[in-house]
Amino acid sequence: MSPIKNDRTPADRKLAKQRIYIKMLHRTLTKTLAGSRIELIHTDDPYTKLKPGAMGTINLIDHFGTIHVNWDDGSTLGLVPQVDKYIIKCKSL
């Protein structure tokens, strides 16, 4: 029986570890922030009727980092970090 061959370079192994870390971070953020309240400060979205000060509840954070929100007015606009401005009011742990 021949030994198992490991063709992965140190850079490949490092990248694989980073991907695992990112997945764990994403899972932790989603679990921690889901259900938290969020307040809209600013969005450039021309199709939304949301105004600054609108409140909503975080539903989930997708793999692109978009924060999906169920807004109190019934809309479901997702917020994009570094584009939209908002304040997250973390739920009590």
Image (cartoon, rainbow, N blue to C red):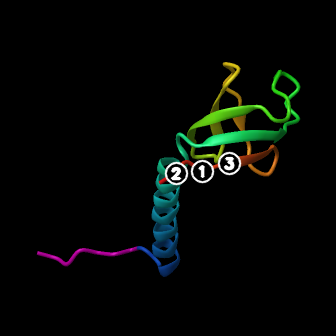
Q: Please give the range of residues in magenta.
A: 1-7
**x, y percentage for residue 43?**
85, 37
Residue 88 on the magenta segment:
no
Q: Nearer the viewer, residue 87 or 5?
A: 87
Check the image and report above or below for 20 versus 8: above
Q: Cα distance, mark 2 to mark 3?
A: 12 Å
Quadrant of the rendered structure where residue 39 is?
top right
Q: Which residue is mark 1?
A: 90
Pointers 1 and 2 in contact (CB under 8 A)?
yes
Q: Is residue 75 left or right of residue 43?
A: left
Q: Which residue is mark 2?
A: 92
**Quadrant (top left, top right, bottom left, bottom right) of the N terminus:** bottom left
**x, y percentage for residue 75?**
69, 21
Quadrant of the rendered structure where residue 20 is?
bottom left
Q: Which residue is mark 3?
A: 88
Pointers 1 and 3 in contact (CB under 8 A)?
yes
Check the image and report above or below for 11 versus 67: below
Which residue of the protein is positioned furthest toward the front in this rendering?
92
- Identify the secondary structure beneath mark 3: strand
**Tag 2: Cα neighbours inside 10 Å, few (<14), some, or many (≥20)?**
few
- Identify the secondary structure beneath mark 2: loop
